[in-house]
Image: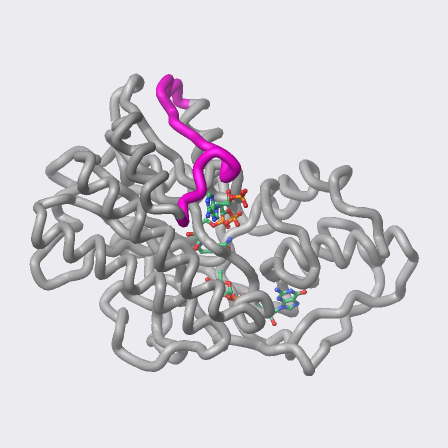
Amino acid sequence: MNKDSRIFIAGHRGLVGSAIHRELTRLGYTHVLTRPRAELDLLDPEAVNEFFATEKPEYVFLAAAKVGGILANNTYPADFIRDNLVLQTNIIDASYRNGVKRLLFLGSSCIYPKLAPQPMPESSLLTGPLEPTNRPYALAKIAGIEMCWSYNRQYGTRYLAAMPTNLYGPGDNYDLANSHVLPALIRKTADAIRTGAPAVTVWGSGTPRRELLYSDDLAQACVFLMNLEDERYNTLFTENQAPLINIGTGEDVTIRELAETVAKVLGFKGSLEFDSSKPDGTPRKLMDVARLHALGWHHTTGLEEGIRRTWEQVQDRLPAAS
Ligand SMILES: NC(=O)C1=CN([C@@H]2O[C@H](COP(=O)(O)OP(=O)(O)OC[C@H]3O[C@@H](n4cnc5c(N)ncnc54)[C@H](OP(=O)(O)O)[C@@H]3O)[C@@H](O)[C@H]2O)C=CC1
Ligand SMILES: C[C@H]1O[C@H](OP(=O)(O)OP(=O)(O)OC[C@H]2O[C@@H](n3cnc4c(=O)[nH]c(N)nc43)[C@H](O)[C@@H]2O)[C@@H](O)[C@@H](O)C1=O
């Protein structure tokens, strides 16, 4: 990308999109295109086509999606499969029709089978059954990967699908019912401190393992991939392999360890309780990040440091404890 390239961030108000926006601004990109949902509903194919035809973006970060934690996915499966299929189809197709040079489609580590080998290489895609709590969302994401691959094969595009591990950061969703585990634990722990509650309730058994990446690190990886020179970028597109790359740290922790780390950073001295009525989900989903490392990108923010930075930025903005 040149500093004056026309770059569209779909989903620029979200956790990932806002981090990509910050990173592009920090690096001095001057022509970043954004539209709030009220002005451009990405579920509307005609509106999306018109936007692309008018603005002619050259590069697209597809960071808009229907996103949520384990309970949201399990409660609203129809919304998750429908909205994601429609939204990503609209953007990928409009990108092709309007000559977008590079598109980065963001998927998720939940595309891999529930019992994939650990760490999970890109080649484990479609090698086994998916985790039921997020199967509709995962299938929409798998369809997005296949769509990038199909357009590349049929139309000669070079659209890449990046699969981030679980993410967190300051622009996250802190709603207790619909959020992912880390923002939920930060809010619950903050609430316990404010109200003097003796314990924080953690969903499930605490034994599942998760790998967590700070949103600013992910944004750096996305911009790094978008900016790869042709010679290295083209190595990601071979006839027999989906155009897929994992983004993560290569390190994971148990949910119990995660809750303990949040307690340490926030200074909570009470105990943890485990609510076995809530689902555990996938037992483990550690990314194999060898492909990304071979290209030269590594994460820089450790888990404790990332939680500390997140906490510093959100502590005054969390809703009052109920
Ligand atoms: N968060 C995580 O842990 C992970 C996320 N990912 C992937 O990263 C990507 C971004 O996720 P994340 O930033 O966390 O999600 P967020 O929910 O924080 O952001 C999603 C963005 O998409 C926008 N959006 C959704 N639907 C529409 C629509 N119909 N029209 C216009 N805009 C819309 C939202 O707009 P609005 O602000 O108006 O709601 C929001 O800005 C997704 O593809 C997700 O699958 C992958 C792995 C883990
Ligand atoms: C990114 C990824 O995110 C989702 O998958 P997930 O990793 O299973 O989601 P999660 O972050 O919500 O939970 C991780 C683990 O943590 C436990 N857990 C404890 N206490 C809380 C808690 O308070 N809230 C939540 N949400 N989880 C909790 C929870 O029970 C589970 O064992 C997918 O839907 C899919 O959309 C996807 O791609």
According to the image, what is the colour scheme of the structure?
A: one colour
Q: Give the residue displayed 63% in from the left and 74% down from the top.
A: 206
Of residue 115 and residue 63, the one placed in the foreground of this image is: 63
Closer-to-camera residue (42/231): 42
Relative image position of residue 187 (x, y in whole percent): 73, 53
Residue at 29 percent across and 33 percent down: it is 52
Q: Nearer the viewer, residue 216 or 36?
A: 36
In this rendered view, identify the residue nearer to me: 139 or 246.
139
Q: Quadrant of residue 289?
A: bottom left
Determine whether, in the image, residue 50 is placed left or right of residue 299.
Answer: left
Q: Is residue 35 magenta?
A: yes
Q: Quadrant of residue 111?
A: bottom left
Image quadrant where one finds the N terminus = top left
Residue 283 percent across, percent down from the top left: 49, 77
The reply to whether residue 236 is in sight is: yes
Please, which residue is most extreme toward the front here? 46
Tell me the residue at 63%/42% (across/down).
310
29 above or below 78?
Answer: above
Q: Quick check: can you spot residue 18?
A: no
Where residue 274 sits: x, y (%)? 72, 76
| Magenta stretch encompasses residue 280 | no
Residue 128 percent across, percent down from the top left: 30, 80
Q: Is residue 189 above or below residue 312?
A: below
Total tally of numbered discs in the picture:
0
Q: For the stretch drawn in magenta, what is the main secondary structure? A: loop
Question: Ligand 2 lies in which image quarter?
Answer: bottom right
Instruction: Magenta stretch: give its range.
Output: 27-43
Tell me the quarter of the image containing the C terminus.
bottom right
